[in-house]
Image (cartoon, helix red, strand yellow):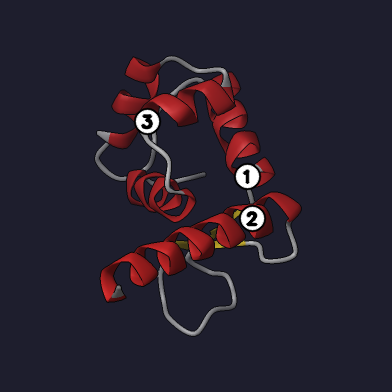
């Protein structure tokens, strides 16, 4: 399962908006909005949840269960650094940040 907070955090890590997540998962924007507005655990039909989690996984997001081995307690998300798509995303974000810093310094 995935919580609304994990879903929002995953989008932030990927640097995408709800529209892009909807495209990636094959779900509608209103469905993504409802999922993110859920109280704690994301609510939706099983097919939608499977599509959402598969899209996040393919994008390089690892969902951390509250009982998973971690340095802190509770649920979370992290990028899978061995994932090709995560590496590409991180490389492009790093390049964009470096470019922004260079513009500021000049």
Q: Nearer the viewer, residue 89 or 106?
A: 106
Rendering quarter of residue 17: top left
Q: Which residue is mark 3?
A: 18
Residue at 58%, 53% (x, y): give it.
89
Picture coordinates of residue 46 (x, y %)? 56, 24
Dot 2 or dot 3: first in sequence order is 3
**Label 2 environment density (alpha carbons within 10 Å; few <14, some 14–19, many ≥20):** many
Residue at 34%, 43% (x, y): give it.
4
Picture coordinates of residue 97 (x, y %)? 42, 64
Marks 2/3: CA–CA distance = 18 Å
Residue at 45%, 55% (x, y): give it.
13
Element type at mark 1: loop
**Label 1 environment density (alpha carbons within 10 Å; few <14, some 14–19, many ≥20):** many
Name above or below for residue 105 compared with residue 24.
Answer: below
Left or right: where 100 falls relative to 82: left
Name above or below for residue 32 compared with residue 53.
Answer: above
Q: Which residue is mark 2?
A: 86
Q: Nearer the viewer, residue 33 or 23?
A: 23
2 and 1 marks in contact (CB < 8 Å): yes
Element type at mark 2: helix
Name above or below for residue 76 compared with residue 47.
Answer: below
Q: Which residue appears farthest toward the bottom when viewing the image?
A: 71
Residue 59's disc number: 1
Picture coordinates of residue 103 (x, y %)? 33, 65
Residue 100's disc number: none
Residue at 61%, 27% (x, y): give it.
51
**Label 3 environment density (alpha carbons within 10 Å; few <14, some 14–19, many ≥20):** some
């Amino acid at each position: 399962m995935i919580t609304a907070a994990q879903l929002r955090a995953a989008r932030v890590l990927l640097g995408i908006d709800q529209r892009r997540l909807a495209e990636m998962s094959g779900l509608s924007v209103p469905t993504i909005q409802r999922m993110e507005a859920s109280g704690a655990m994301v609510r939706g039909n099983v097919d939608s949840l499977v599509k959402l989690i598969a899209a996040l996984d393919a994008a390089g997001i690892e969902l951390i269960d509250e009982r998973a081995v971690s340095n802190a307690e509770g649920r979370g998300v992290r990028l899978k650094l061995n994932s090709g798509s995560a590496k590409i995303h991180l490389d492009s974000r790093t390049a964009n940040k470096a470019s922004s810093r260079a513009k500021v310094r000049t």
